Image: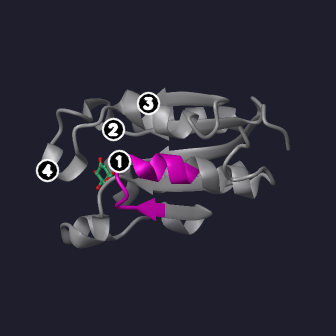
Amino acid sequence: MTEDATILLAHGPNLSQLGRRDPTIYGTATLDDADAAARAVHPQLDRFQSEHEGELVHRLHRARDDGTSAVILNPGALTHYSYALRDAVEMLGIPVVEVHLSQTHAREPFRRHSVISPAADITITGAGILGYRLAAMACRDRLGLDAVPSA
Ligand code: DQA
């Protein structure tokens, strides 16, 4: 795999509101900051965000045919109940890193279970924006690239 491998960064519902959404839990960084954190590690990044489950499912289907090499996915609340999204993740056949900004295991009981995790290769939870950087590093590692690109 080469440096021009494309990583898809997919964000689920309400992540568009980062920066103004409960900063005590999610911090003040925006979605653009999340993208930038991943891009700083792997510039060849395709970003997608949707408030709609079906659009996310469609985007993952497309990832099977558009040359995407790995996926970073924060499914938002879909994490906790979307079997449709989980099935789409399962079908991908490329590395998938699930990311959560907040430490979901220390929050309300319904957030402590992810239906996505069994289909993901790696899950990063509670590291805030740093989680996206770590996720990009994890994708690179799974793709056989240096986790941190050499300068
Ligand atoms: C989240 C955690 C989910 O429980 C929540 O619904 C989100 C964001 C996170 O990044 O911490 O929308 O995925």
Please, what is the three-letter code of the amino acid marked with disc 2?
Pro
Residue 126 in sight from this viewpoint: yes
Q: Nearer the viewer, residue 104 or 86?
A: 104
Label 1 residue near ligand 1, CB within 8 Å: yes
Quadrant, the C terminus:
top right
Residue drawn 64% across and 37% down?
Answer: 42
Residue drawn 70% across and 50% down?
Answer: 140
Please, what is the three-letter code of the amino acid marked with disc 1?
Gly
Residue 13: mark: 2
| Residue 118 screen position, x and y as percent | 55, 69
**CB under 8 Å between callouts 1 and 4?**
no
Please, what is the three-letter code of the amino acid marked with disc 4?
Thr
Which segment is the magenta one? 124-135
Q: Nearer the viewer, residue 124 or 15?
A: 124
Q: Which residue is mark 3?
A: 49
Q: CA distance from mark 2 to mark 1?
A: 6 Å
Q: Which residue is mark 1?
A: 76
Which badge, 2 or 1, is on the more N-terminal residue?
2
Q: Which residue is mark 4?
A: 24
| Residue 78 screen position, x and y as percent | 37, 50
Residue lying furthest front in this view? 151
Which badge, 3 or 1, is on the more N-terminal residue?
3
Quadrant, the N terminus:
top right
